[in-house]
Image (cartoon, helix red, strand yellow):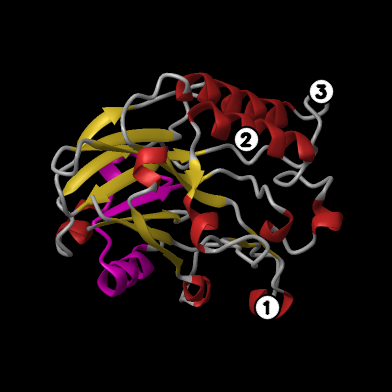
Amino acid sequence: MISIATWNINSVRLRMPIVERFLKEEAPDVLCLQEIKCQEHQFPFKAFEALGYNHFAIHGQKGYHGVATVSRVPITEFSRHDWQANGEARHVGVELPDHDGMIVENVYIPAGGDEPDREKNPKFGQKLDFFERMTRWADTIDRPTLIVGDFNVAPLESDVWSHKQLLKVVSHTPIEVETMQRFKDAHGFTDIGREFIRDPDRYYSWWSYRSKDWKVNDRGRRLDHMWASPELAAQSTRHWLREDARDWEKPSDHIPLITEFDL
């Protein structure tokens, strides 16, 4: 068995106390973090090592974005793609040599700004182009691959608190859903979350900081995903999330997701 977790932590140094709590309570073998918001030399290596996480693949930058994969089992950095074509640190891939050569791709896809119009909002166009570059990459995959992270798209009606009210809101617009679906189809990825938490059951991973009481309003969206190659998806045995982490002290606006595989 091996367990993989993903979490947009929204500043790893600021939220290290809740990361430590999560690792003590869940102890995933591999943790993929997005939005670490620090350079590699600023990453809190010692705090992870104290918990038995001694293997790292860090792709960071000053103040923004950044992804990190930390592990209790050996990992080897496998890839770094600039799918936004602007030098931002949004991806790192690792190989797990002791687990059938499994590849874990950790990605932070751009949010896309506020206006779902490529002409009026260049950030939205960058987001769509990011997906298109990932789609071309997906055609080349020839290894058991798990891609995880903050995709910043909630594709299904049950992935958002109100399908009708969010149809014109970035993260749930038809063009984003269609663009992400093309990426998914390019390699035949399986949406692990929805294999275990079936549509139309409610499944959210993000609640805005703007909501004074996130639990009462429950205006969530499923922006975080774990997708597996067909052969790897067949080996998944369990998937769960820690919704209570949204209520921890100084929380991220995202929660962690975990999948277990029998390799």
Residue sitting at x 68%, y 30% = 123
| Of pointers 3 and 2, the one earlier in the residue sequence | 3
> Could you say where residue 188 lies in the image, as x and y percent from the top left?
50, 33
> Could you say where residue 215 lies in the image, as x and y percent from the top left?
65, 78
Numbered circle sitting on residue 119: 3
| Residue range (magenta) | 16-44
Specify whether residue 132 is painted magenta: no
Q: Which amino acid, mark 1?
A: Asp
Viewer-nearest of labels 3 and 2? 2
Q: Is residue 136 left or right of residue 233?
A: right
Mark 1, other Cα within 10 Å: few <14 / some 14–19 / many ≥20? few
Q: Which amino acid, mark 3?
A: Glu
- Per the image, the residue denoted by label 1 is 213
Find residue 182 and report its image quarter: top right
> Which is nearer the eye, 28 or 194?
194
Mark 3, other Cα within 10 Å: few <14 / some 14–19 / many ≥20? few
